[in-house]
Image (cartoon, helix red, strand yellow):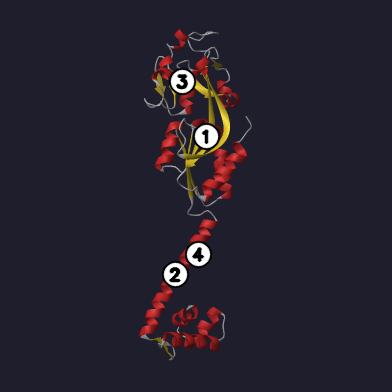
Amino acid sequence: MRIFHAVARFGGFRAAAADVSLSQSAVSQAIKQLETKLDQALVVRDRPIRLTRAGRRLYRYVDDQLQREHALLAEMERLAHGRDQQLSVGIDSTTNRFAGADLIAALAGRWPEARLRLVEQPSRAIVSAVLSGEVELGLGPFQTRMDRFECWPLYEEERLLMISPTHPLHRPRMTLADVERIPLVVSSLDEPDQRPYQDKLRDRFRMIWQISSLNVRLDLIDRGLAVGYLSTEMARQLPRIRHFRALREFEFARIERQVGLFHRRDRDPSALARDFIALCQQRLERAG
């Protein structure tokens, strides 16, 4: 078929022979064999050759198939180099603050042509985004119910309730009555049916300020306007908040969370997602 296509395209046996790297006689013989097989004359051997009606129909068919083949091969080549592939990841603000840029840079080095999308979201919103298909992967604290996901734990995170010494109500040892007069700043709120009413942390504070921006939350705490739960890793790495004090005098001041990756269990991760998972395991997994 390729030989016939070359003969029809170039209008002669000599040019077709050069294109397919065969002798002119071999090309002529191949056309004769094809005509015998189809029991149809395909070309009129003039100079230049002319296609018969059957030849024109066959040429259109072969040309279409070759174009499809070329398009498929080009797509396979793009996929092999990451082109036309994309990955979207929902990530919580703490993980994004300390690892987001490094992870994207490392993945871009492996998949230079891939389209990458990192969406910073509150941890509960990440779960919803993965379930809805808005993002393929979630990277952040696991929630209570994760049975619909395949999960890859990475590390345990400790969060402490912190206050700035500049807060007007701050004392070396505070009371529940003190805390009940202070707003708590969070990235998101639990839905009303997520926890029993008496167990909701929000009920221990004057009010709740829901602020999606990590920097704004830190500023509000630093200005002595609110308290908030911050990871011990953040307190260790950010000089600007090292003066914050953990309110360890309260049993509810400490929260432990498992941080990791998760993907919808009923879907297979893309090659790009699998590579990102391996990358996170290499860079973020730590003992205990």
Q: Nearer the viewer, mark 3 or mark 4?
A: 4
Q: On the image, numbered disc 2 is attached to which residue?
A: 67
Q: On the image, numbered disc 4 is attached to which residue?
A: 73
Q: Nearer the viewer, mark 3 or mark 1?
A: 1
Q: Which mark is residue 143?
A: none
Q: Position of residue 124 (x, y in %)?
A: 43, 32
Whichever of labels 2 and 1 marks the residue nearer the N terminus, that label is 2
Is disc 1 surrounded by few (<14), some (14 to 19) or many (20+) residues within 10 Å? some
Q: On the image, numbered disc 3 is attached to which residue?
A: 220
What amino acid is labelled 2 in the image?
A: Gln
Q: In the rendered picture of this protein, how many numbered marks are placed on residues?
A: 4
Q: On the image, numbered disc 1 is attached to which residue?
A: 96
Is disc 4 surrounded by few (<14), some (14 to 19) or many (20+) residues within 10 Å? few
Report which quarter residue 191 is drawn in.
top left
Residues marked 2 and 1 touching at CB (< 8 Å): no
Whichever of labels 2 and 4 marks the residue nearer the N terminus, that label is 2
Q: Position of residue 282 (x, y in %)?
A: 62, 40
Is residue 137 visible from the viewing direction of this image?
no
Residues marked 3 and 2 touching at CB (< 8 Å): no
In three-dimensional space, the C-alpha distance between marks 2 and 4, rounded to whole angstroms, equals 10 Å
Nearer to the camera, 243 or 250: 250
Whichever of labels 3 and 2 marks the residue nearer the N terminus, that label is 2
Q: Residue at coordinates 51% horizontally, 58% vertically from top-left?
A: 78
